[in-house]
Image (cartoon, grey):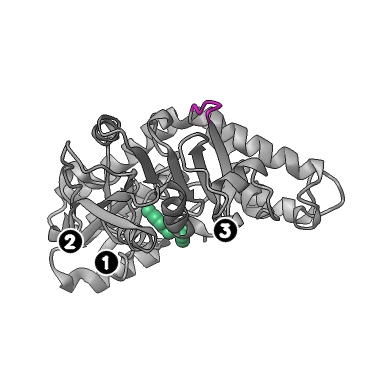
Amino acid sequence: MKKHNFSAGPSILNHNVIKAAAESVIDINNLGLSLLEISHRSNDFIKIIEEAKSLIKDLLNINEQYEVLFLQGGASLQFYMSALNFAKRNGKAGYIDTGTWSSKAIDESKKVGETLILASSKDQNYTYIPEINEKIDNIDYLHFTSNNTIYGTQFHSFENISKIALANNTKLICDMSSDILSKEFDVNKFDLIYAGAQKNIGPAGTTLVIIRKDGFEKNNKLPTYLNYQTHIEKQSMFNTPPVFPIYVCLLTLRWIKKLGGIKSIEKNNIKKANLIYDEIDRNSLFYGIVKQKDRSNMNVTFQLKNKKHEDTFNKMCHAVGISGIYGHRSIGGYRASIYNALKTESIYVLIDVMQKLEQK
Ligand SMILES: *Cc1c(COP(=O)(O)O)cnc(C)c1O
């Protein structure tokens, strides 16, 4: 039985994407060769990476001031790499602390230089998005995490934070690992966006980086591999790129384009999120963990009011093929990750189980 995959990452991919990806492993473009055994310098692969980049640019409305890169090392390497490239000598960096992933980014920044925490929701176990003071210290850049995969909170608007960055004449950096391509936004407000592919774009193994070419400090003393300039100049081909993950990203991007682009994806995501949050609020056995206005449209966190139902609920979920619904080990409870590729039908299956539990 095909499962209803609510996993937080690596996560669900569209079924036709997976099928085409599988075929490419046997034979790509009828070459009589597998995608895995052709040169990354071959025309066949160059076409793949170029189309992937141009679809990202097209879907997110990105202009020529930006470069789209497919790198390796995950979002986790970007924590350090972004700090290394955007910090000026003797400068300070500013971070918004909204949970585990931002805390990890903060730890890496501290290895590079002075790091200020401009706002944090740690006081309430990261269950809300904190307000940011309009007047901030003189910093080199402002870093935040747009969607907090573990806690289930999300910045629903970038208006305020980008206004603050602009007013304070500072660069804006965002970790969009778990909500990139899920909603429309203005890339022009950002100097750097990065996202591990395995939440909403493709399999693990590549990281999408969108960088403003004149937005960072050029410094040829940096380790070659950790210098964005290297990857910009070499067009993501400084070393052998992860060809298979990039190809699967391309297949996902084509699928999004065919669906009508980000606008229609976003509409569908809002619909899916509303369905499940409405049930959490209506159902007498469950409650949502985070502040209502900051609820994520990608990772829906919730709990049972009474733990005695846990075993039954888990078994019922299992019986209908619901997979990956348990909360992150650090907070427990439940987390339904409802990324782009998750069908509304799967949401209905989950809602049905919640209702049947209540009726028992
Ligand atoms: C998953 C995740 C990461 C870590 O990504 P890796 O690619 O595994 O390094 C970082 N930030 C956010 C918001 C995430 O969801």
Residue 290 in sight in this render: yes
SS type, badge 1: helix
Q: Position of residue 205 (x, y in %)?
A: 57, 58
Under 8 Å from ligand 1: the CB of mark 2? no
SS type, badge 3: loop
Task: Check residue 62 for magenta coloring.
Answer: yes
Within-10-Å neighbours for mark 2: few <14, some 14–19, many 20+: few
Residue position marked by numbered label 2 in the rendering: 125
As measured in the structure, the alpha-carbon distance from the residue carrying label 2 to the one carrying label 1 is 25 Å
Which residue is more in the foreground, 178 or 358? 178
Q: Position of residue 260 (x, y in %)?
A: 50, 27
At label 2, the amino acid type is: Asn
Question: Where are the magenta residues, as a range?
Answer: 61-65
Under 8 Å from ligand 1: the CB of mark 1? no
SS type, badge 2: loop
Compared with 88, 111 (above or below) is: below
Which residue is more in the foreground, 185 or 108? 108
Which quadrant would the C terminus be assigned to in this image?
bottom left
Label 3 near label 1: C-beta < 8 Å?
A: no
At label 3, the amino acid type is: Pro
At label 1, the amino acid type is: Phe
Of marks 3 and 2, the one in the foreground? 3
Of marks 1 and 3, the one in the foreground? 3
Residue position marked by numbered label 3 in the rendering: 223
Label 1 near label 2: C-beta < 8 Å?
A: no
Residue position marked by numbered label 1 in the rendering: 313
Of marks 2 and 1, the one in the foreground? 2
Residue 3 in sight in this render: no
Compared with 331, 5 (above or below) is: above
Taking the image as shown, residue 343 lies to the left or right of residue 27, namely left
In primary-sequence order, the first of circles 3 and 2 is 2
